[in-house]
Image (cartoon, rainbow, N blue to C red):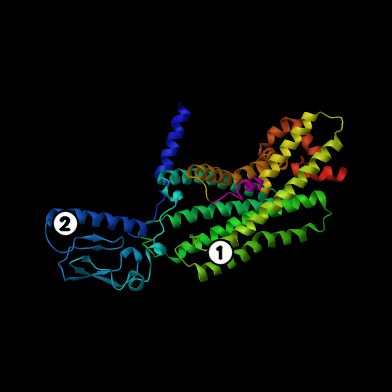
Amino acid sequence: MRLWTLSRAAVAVLLTFCPRVKAIPSDCDPEIQWLKEEDNCYSIIHQDNLTHTGSTGCSVLWDHLNCWPHAQVGETVSQPCPTFLKVKGDVMRNCTEAGWSEPFPPYELACGYTLNNTLHFPPDIMLMSPEYFMWVRIMYSMGYSISLISLIIALTLLYMFRKLHCTRNYIHMQLFLSFILRAAFIFIRDAVLHNSQDYYHCDSHPPGCKVALLLSNYCILANYSWLLVEGHYLHSLIHLSLYSQRKRLHWYISLGWGTPMLIIIVWSVAKYLQENEGCWETRGNSWIWWILRVPVFLVIIVNLVFFMRIIRTLVRKMRALDMIGNEFKQHRKLAKSTLLLVSLFGVQYALFTFFPDEVSILTFQIWNAIELAMASTQGFIVALLYCFLNGEVQHEIKRRWRRWQPKKRFHGDPRMHNGSLSHSGLPLTQISLLARANNMS
């Protein structure tokens, strides 16, 4: 009961401090403006029918673009282009004995737009309730918060312990940093994109929101790039003879941070030249969006290939090392290795890579919630498996802790000086075991 109370309190705090997901202001959304003007015109028509019963002339008319007021025969009425078309111009109609004439000049000429080309009514996905987006945002905000805190602690531990400084852990540190930047800039992006309506009034979008989205996309690409680096490093460790690790680290840094920079520069130039709208969050030109999607797809596919090859090698090594051993024990080792590799390679992203665009609302809601939950907590899982549960890190923490203990405790218990770990060396991590298994074959 107490746990339930604390959970409700935590959710209440999040609801208080997390801003709600805001849609486009109502006075800026063309569809909403069109619906409002239609409602207003029908109200005027109803009132006109009550006040001008039996009168001559032309009644109030709604032509799906403008509301034409009551007029006498022979009168010419001029109306500006509809506000939701966001263009300047005038359209006129004559009131004749047969009723209203056709508009002149036509809307296509006077306003430069047609109804079909301008009004794009929201698809089913836009009909979802704002509460869904609010709860999804709270959910992934909690996930990224947990990941951000755990990753900062993990990065600090790997940086502090000099005995852990090696190529493998340097790559882990870069991966942790990419997760940290990804979470941080997602928070910044949300804070900027969901700012007050005065900040984003209609078509006024300051450059800051575009920069925030650009940096957020860069950090996401860098995160995928470092997942590829992790996959390539472990695959090379097992299958290939490696050259200088320091030279390879330099190439990895160029791949992890440099390649996403080139991609994001190409994307931003294409956005600026072809689709410089809003905060660059629109996807009107699909080929511009594919500039970001294609590299992500390639990373996921390549890492999936690495994953399958490593799993196949693990199965072969385990059978060779323990031909007479317990089959359950082999399966247990394989399950542990698979769990480690799935989070390290980001294999779970393969589930969402080719998700179709045209799906029902319920399917999208479920799938979107699962994807965001997994993406937001992946940083925490990586920090947990490759730092907090890492035998080398645990050994260093225990060694530092013993060093910080009062000296009298060390003098009082000689066993503190002759622990088994100090004689046997650092415990092996899962990756070390994989490398050793490869060397023994």
Tell whether position 355 is magenta.
yes
Residue 350 percent coordinates (x, y): 64, 48
Q: Which residues are magenta?
A: 346-357
Labels 1, 2: front one: 2
Residue 356 percent coordinates (x, y): 57, 50
Left or right: 263, with 209 as reference point: right
Tell whether position 400 is magenta.
no
Helix, strand, or loop for circle 2? Answer: helix
Residue 44 percent coordinates (x, y): 20, 56
**CB under 8 Å between discs 1 and 2:** no
Residue 428: name its quadrant. Answer: top right
Q: Residue at x 63, y 61 (%)?
A: 260
Q: Residues within 10 Å of mark 2 (few under 14, many from 20)?
A: some
Q: Residues within 10 Å of mark 1 (few under 14, many from 20)?
A: some
Residue 184 percent coordinates (x, y): 53, 53
Can you name the residue that lies furthest to the front here?
98
Residue kind at label 2, given as amino acid type: Asp
Left or right: 16, with 430 as reference point: left
Foreground residue among 167 and 231: 231
Give the label on residue 26, or none.
none
Question: What whole-number distance in Å separates the C-alpha atoms at marks 1 and 2?
Answer: 50 Å
Please name the residue that numbered disc 2 is placed on: 48
Residue 351 visible to the viewer: yes
Q: Residue at x 20, y 65 (%)?
A: 98
Helix, strand, or loop for circle 1? Answer: helix
Foreground residue among 432 and 370: 370
Location of residue 374 with respect to 208 vertically, above or below: above
Please name the residue that numbered disc 1 is placed on: 288
Left or right: 256, with 417 as reference point: left
Foreground residue among 281 and 428: 281
